[in-house]
Image (tube, rainbow, N blue to C red):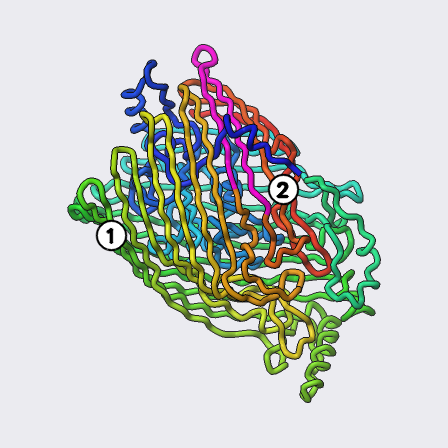
Amino acid sequence: MYKSCGGIWLAGVAAVAMSGGFHAAAMAGEGMAPATVPAAPGGPGGAAEQDAALRDTDIIVTAQKRAQNLSDVPMSITAVTGEQLQSRGIASVQDLVKLAPGFNYVESGIGVPVYSLRGIGFFDTSIGARPTVSVYIDEAPLPFSVMSQGAAFDIERVEILKGPQGTLFGQNSTGGAINYIAAKPKDVFGAGITASYARFNTVDAQGYITGPVAPGLDFRIAARGVRSGGWQKSYTRDDTLGEQRFAQGRFMLDWHGVDRLKVSLNLSGFIDRSDTQAGQFKAPLPQIPSVASRIPLLLAYPVAPENARAADWDPGQAYRRDNRFYQIALRTDYELTDQVTLTMLNDWSHMRVDQDVDIDGTALKMTDQNVYGRISSFSTEVRATGRFGPATVILGASYARDKTHEEGYFDSPYSTENAAFTPTTNDAATWSFGKQSFRTYAVFGNVDLDIGDKVTLHGGARYTKADLSYDTCLRAGNDNSGIALTKVFNSARASQGLPPLAPILGGECTMLQADLSVGPSIGSFDQDNVSWKAGADFKPAPNTLLYFNVSRGYKAGSIPVTSSISYITFLPVRQESVLAYELGFKASLFDRLLDATGALFNYDYTDKQLKGRSIITPNIFGPLEALTNIPKSRIRGAEAQLILYPLRGLTLSASGTYLDTRVIGDFMNYTILANLRNFEGNPFPYTPKYQYNLDASYKFPATGDLDMTLAANFAHRSRTSAGFGNEAPLRIDAYGTLDLRAGIGSRDGRWTAEVFGKNVTNSYYWTNVAKLFDVVRRLSGQPATYGVRFSHKF
């Protein structure tokens, strides 16, 4: 386990962006070197020249759906340029944990990512789960997290907005929003390539071409391909897993051939045929203890060593993805007058998911899952943005239609489930099935009113109507499984004086209803709400901003698609709501040699959604996995960041987040290990109390027209748990990772070459741990990787 070296690094290295920084910090992604690095006062490029350079490097963001300087936005934002992400090897949403304390990523275990900001997240393994941290590309939504894998590609910048964003970005953004801004076509020809070679024979190459097609019509084509060998090694035989086979592309057209009118077309997609990750076997924990003696090989199975690469999976089985994603977005901006712009954004996306996962982390034929699904989404938004004297007004309406179809086939021949239900045929199998259709209607408005030149008032609201219809069930995987479950159901029915059921055959629904009949769960779940936000900011001096916001946000209700035989596990959960308060500041000090930002925040939750347990009557299966609502809970926290520019070319920064999360009042439920507990006072799962990032970057002349760069980043998070109840098997230990890089390049920025290392201390850590069927298994983080990278602009 990596021991924190924060004390050693605190004096010299830094973290990347918390809340929005100022000027050079903004261009630096709040913690990374800006394009033009200021000198210290007194030398060449002193204070006056430095101020001009900083103003030139201000980054413009669209966090409030209009162009603003990052330093003028009264909320916590991380903004990082595409070049900085590329130089750091940040190629996915989950890698943002290295840049923004308070942001967390968890791999669910079946290939569905779970994101959270400031402790606000929603853990569910369904591909149709509605996240609390929404991801967008040029404001076009990716409504399901599984769609976001290719988002960090050929981008101009990424904006990470913390706190509820329901008024402008929609009902499910209670945790925040991540908006990737794609690199845009240019009216002059240009091209660029970036290629790297790293450990495990990893080749990552991407490039772009841009230029004019005709007067007023520009294009950009970009493509990327990743290929690697397996990074995981079996610890019981000679075998590897973890190959990458990933390709993506984007085609963009910008038309501005008519005065006041701009039209942008964005076509993008990816194909992922990479291996899924295998787990590390931690301990046996039989689901049905009374028949545990029938799986002796599991009880004697060796525990995985504490090594990032060590894992196990069934030999001869292809555990990989065959996922495809496509998106079309069309945006039109028309200036009705010099003060009013009308914007229409239409987006259609489609994804097919097909992936096999080893659930148990052993080489035994225990539990495999094949996940197959289709997701389609259409959304449209129309809004008008106007400047009327001291007021900036946004009014709009939106509509979205999302459909998901998901199937999960569970095969568990060597398990207590098989021993209990199909011991003679040895073919226990189930097949989960679910369809969901979401229709979302909304109208919204936002006003920013300047009171003099120092005070601005903010207010906004969105009315949302969310309609959900669903059709779910668990099917028998084969005739023997169906007949075995029929016997169990009939035993329960006999205890209630009910007649027996006819034998259930393979493919038929095996879901037990409240009246002990068998059939699918079909229904609708319609809700509405009003999200709102109010606040004020005050500029007591140049380069200083104080702000206070209060907001109400909502996350829509949803249903899981899981392997369970009771209707109770497929019931929808109510929408959750959060009342959020935030008090923050942004300041540039000492002639802009130091940028400081910070915020205090408090989130009061009602009906927070949780994956817990429920029991049916009669209790024939024990606690069953189900979504539920926590009546009351809260998050209190603080974040701060310091960015220092002591010398020309040298940037040091340090940032951190503190979170105090807990359930308020009595809340009785079952832990992941099926123990009944009162969760009062429990902290939220997957929510470290402390996170901090330290970063240093030094760019200096080498020789002639060449510059050299040395950089380091250290990211640390404290321990947490994978579930409520404070149970030891679910502990996720504290860990830290150290990245280093050194490069050389032309002073005009046309080419760079560098060597890099990630997790160079080879810290062993895991990001998730779960009790699944008869085992407890965890998912390890990546081991040390190192390589070389080259980029060139033509």
Q: Nearer the viewer, residue 184 or 307?
A: 307
Q: Amino acid at mark 1?
A: Val
| Count of numbered labels shown in the rendering | 2
Q: Which residues are magenta?
A: 691-719
Quarter of the image where the N terminus is located:
top right
Classify mark 1: helix, strand or loop.
strand
Q: Find out whether residue 97 is within the magenta segment.
A: no
Q: Position of residue 127 (x, y in %)?
A: 54, 57
Residue 110 visible in this rendered orientation of the protein:
yes
Q: Position of residue 500 (x, y in %)?
A: 70, 85
Indicate the position of residue 560 as horizontal and vertical percent values.
55, 64
Q: Secondary structure at mark 2?
A: loop
Please identify the residue farthest to the left as the structure is shown: 389
Residue 698 is covered by the magenta coloring: yes
**Of residues 362 and 794, the one drawn nearer to the viewer in this rendering:** 362
**Residue 328 at least partly seen:** no
* Label 1 vs 2, first from the N-terminus: 1
Q: Is residue 244 left or right of residue 418?
A: left
Q: Mark 1: give few (<14), some (14-19) or many (20+) Cα within 10 Å.
A: some
Q: Is residue 464 left or right of residue 149?
A: left
As shown in the figure, which amino acid type bears the numbered disc 2?
A: Gly
**Relative horizontal placement of residue 731, taking residue 464 as reference (left or right):** right
Estimate how packed mark 2 is, as few (under 14), some (14 to 19) or many (20 or more) residues with alpha carbons within 10 Å. some
Q: Is residue 81 above or below residue 263?
A: above
Q: Check the image and report above or below for 567 versus 83.
A: below
Residue drawn 42% across and 50% down?
176
Indicate which disc residue 781 carries: 2
| Quadrant that contains the C terminus | top left
Q: CA distance from mark 1 to mark 2?
A: 44 Å
For mark 1, what is the residue? 447
> Is the stretch drawn in magenta largely helix, strand or loop?
strand
